[in-house]
């Protein structure tokens, strides 16, 4: 269960009192008070077999606790026994795709990759080798609105808990960002806010930075400005051509995206305004 | 306040219920359940001005809560308004000493460095520049027991909350380790358990490792085997001589020791058996 | 071309004079003098189209230069136009295998993965999806010598430039280490020399280290003691179970092994005694 | 000696041939070809006692070699036996100052810190403890041009090889940037080009980044846009207030600045256009 609300005394007591009352065995508990926004956030993982209630009852009872805490309280309660569903959007680069398919296959995510959609057909062969359906939706320069409509219909058909832009090279229109808010996750191949937009490794080369990076963030209508889930960097030097950066950058993109996707699927990421709380 | 006890349901509820009851405003809360040892650990920071009780009353009342939780419960309650005291032990290398003196002077530690003791007089001048008393205790090869007795008397005179071996090159005898258990903190210039003992950079050079490291740990009678508080590493390559490693290693030693000392002084480190829980 | 020899003045002049004489355009040049061993090492990459000689002539001419430098000179000259060959040895863990197959498929290595050999059949399906032959060689407890003989015959049939133990869980016998010296590359899931041998993550958990690591090294008859090619680490804390370490460790193992294999295949690794010079 | 010139075949042969001819024992040699700009760069360290020429003769002879290589060749030849001189500019923050004073005192730089100039008097006491003269130059809002004139006169009096802005909070005017080009080194407390200008940690907090950084660069008339010498980052999370970032950021600022200053003083940094080649 995750919960966010305006901070005041007694919240932890209310929640932990409730969990104790129903006999819940807490396996993970994390808390965060943000003095600036005045909000409080928590995530609690409780062993299902320690509680006698079924999920609907538990949700109803916890909803009562949340309502007592305050009217602005936002909360979720997820049954980890129910597998989540993921759709990947790709273009031509295979590194993030193969990494996510491999992790899903060996059970690193509490989710199934239900489908992969490409604006190019290049990655169909790789995808289907893993037994995952691939859909090709072309994005002609003069037919993008129709393509996005087709994409949305296709993706929404899977009711995904995460729509992962795994080096998808199309910019989502504002209405789709809104529709998929909090579920669409992008990997940008720079340490944001540096090098927003196109060809970040070329920008990095021109600027002569000594580290390259990658940023995993929720997609919003502001390009590359959504809430950041995870970032990391990798050392380069004057010897690196942009091609070298592209190759080394793949490893950072892959790692950062896979962490962000896993944390999202494990309900470890709480969004508040333009920022995230990540109980990793 | 910190608390460790055998894990069972209801502990968080008991503690947070108590804090809510006295009106305490929690500014930081961290929890850890260790499934292997079956122990539970927590650290809670409460704003003093949100509670009407004085420290002694609070300690008494919290002791009652702890007793109800169980007979094996270990707990501490620290008044951050009372400044702690630190004694540093040094030899000839100045990098950790100057770093700790600088941090203390700009208020990074909730503590005062009360004295520095050296088995060589080399660092007296540097120490006294910062207004800190320096004591020279020679350690002749044939007079170590007497030297350690003198050292202990001198150090204990300051009733220190931390005795920091800031590149002190003498091995504490077992009885002194026992006497200062949980308060004596050492920096070892390798990524333990690699390269225990003397001249770790020379050992690292001979083995051809690609990273060098440093480890901050509590001192126990087993050489370099006490509970680890913090570690970090730094990349090297075939071009590094041992002298290069020594120079680059200073930066890692300095950082790792300063983090470990700060966390210890802020009661962020809970020791259980051979390991630590660090609520950093 | 790579070259190692006892150091003296004039070596660089001899080599660069020769390259200039044949009109060679140097794209990469790296040098290392090791004051301790008194050896000199270099690696030079020259554009093939800048030189009029064919490879055999060039090799003959460079051999003359090397002989003039001294009788102990060791050198290689590789035509990057000739693709190298790799055989992978695996057990049940898929993460390194899938990573290497993916990199090979997108052309990150100047080599082809010719075959994968497993002591278990589990990874056959994954391997063949990438169009790579899989061979199952069982290693029964009472039939290991025969199994290693079969393994050697199979592997040697591919005359591989690299034999990569990608989480292969069998210890090579001394004669095979000798036979494959300088070509057999292993990934060990600890920061060596810490935690040699079995179950390093369990050893790491028991010791309470704050970083876990991985080491890529050449295989020698001394277990986990061969020349180190690459190492890296990843931060953990008290919250990590051994299962968490295993999962997080996969990412480090994968990265470290892939770097080591690429550097080896690009002739960037020169072995001297128990150590490596890596011109990365 | 360092050298940069348009790339062509035979440059290394010319330089190494010359060094061999004078009997020079090369202790370090590094090369870089930049395919984009078409320039070649090298740095060679030669043992003075292996060469019979004095520095002036050597400089004259090497100048001839450089002229033969081409008319655009830029080169330097430094006698490491002559100690360099450094002036530090500071404001109120002590962390970089104390770190640099400590390193200089223990001989980590091939240079002497000749003076510290502050726009506030706060750090006078700390500076003079290390036996270094401190000058206070006030920068009143309505008297900045005069203050900069006084600053320049004072600094130029020391003919420094490096003018280090160690958290100096005044922006140098364009003419002073020009005057001190290639010698004025700044530390900016962000991972540039992110968070240019004032209060970068507050900008980082608002954006919700997961890493904070620092950048050491040469000062140019474009604010925070000069050639980057070194950068590094440090992990943060949602729990970090700006005050926490400021504290943790000090460690990164300190390390990054000290590396940049050392490399500059050891002639390891070659500037070409907006970028640097760093032979670290």
Image (tube, coloured by chain):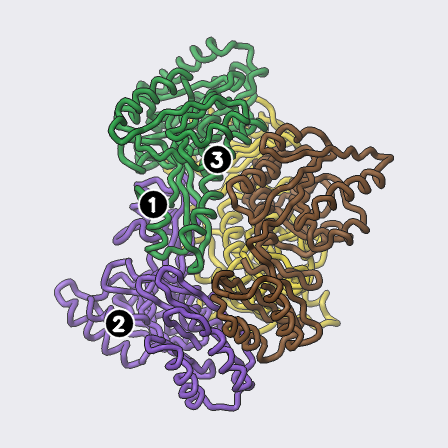
Chain colours: A purple, B brown, C yellow, D green
* Closer to us: D215 or B148: B148
**Badge 2 sits on which subunit?**
A
Q: Is residue C170 above or below residue B206?
A: below
Q: Residues within 10 Å of mark 1 (few under 14, many from 20)?
A: few
Q: Indicate the quadrant containing the C terminus of chain B: top left, top right, bottom left or bottom right.
A: bottom right
Disc 1 versus disc 3: nearer the observer = 1
The residue singled out by tag 3 in the image is D259
* Residue C171 visible in the snapshot: no
- Mark 1 or mark 3, earlier in chain: 1
Name the element at disc 3: helix
Name the element at disc 1: loop
Residue B177, given in percent of the width and then of the height, sits at 76, 51
Residue C55, given in percent of the width and then of the height, sits at 46, 39
Name the element at disc 2: strand
Q: Residue at x 29, y 71 (%)?
A: A117
The residue singled out by tag 2 in the image is A136
Q: Residue at x 56, y 26 (%)?
A: D27
Disc 3 versus disc 2: nearer the observer = 3
* Residue D30 visible in the snapshot: yes
Cα distance in 3D space between marks 2 and 1: 47 Å
Tell me, yes or no, whether the two marked residues, 3 and 2, touch with CB atoms within 8 Å.
no
The residue singled out by tag 1 in the image is D199
């Amino acid at each position: 269960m995750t919960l966010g609300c305006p901070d005041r005394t007694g919240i932890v007591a209310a929640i932990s009192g409730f969990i104790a009352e129903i006999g819940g065995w807490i396996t993970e508990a994390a808390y965060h008070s943000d003095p600036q926004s005045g909000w409080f956030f928590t995530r609690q993982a409780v062993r299902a077999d320690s509680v006698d209630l079924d999920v609907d009852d538990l949700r109803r009872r916890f909803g009562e606790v949340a309502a007592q805490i305050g009217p602005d309280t936002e909360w979720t309660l997820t049954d980890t026994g129910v597998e989540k569903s993921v759709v990947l959007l790709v273009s031509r680069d295979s590194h993030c795709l193969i990494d996510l398919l491999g992790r899903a296959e060996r059970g690193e995510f509490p989710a199934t990759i239900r489908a992969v959609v490409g604006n190019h057909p290049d990655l169909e062969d790789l995808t289907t080798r893993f037994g995952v359906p691939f859909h090709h939706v072309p994005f002609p320069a003069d037919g993008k609105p129709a393509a996005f409509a087709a994409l949305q219909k296709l993706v929404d058909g899977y009711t995904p808990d995460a729509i992962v832009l795994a080096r998808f090279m199309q910019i989502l229109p504002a209405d789709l960002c809104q529709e998929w808010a909090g579920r669409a996750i992008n990997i940008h191949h720079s340490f944001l806010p540096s090098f927003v937009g196109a060809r970040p490794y070329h920008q990095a080369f021109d600027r002569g930075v000594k580290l390259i990076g990658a940023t995993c963030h929720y997609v919003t209508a502001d390009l590359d400005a959504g809430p950041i889930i995870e970032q990391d960097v990798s050392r380069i030097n004057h010897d690196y051509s942009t091609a070298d950066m592209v190759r080394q950058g793949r490893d950072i993109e892959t790692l950062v995206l896979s962490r962000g996707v896993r944390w999202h699927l494990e309900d470890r990421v709480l969004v508040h305004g333009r920022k995230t709380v990540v109980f990793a």
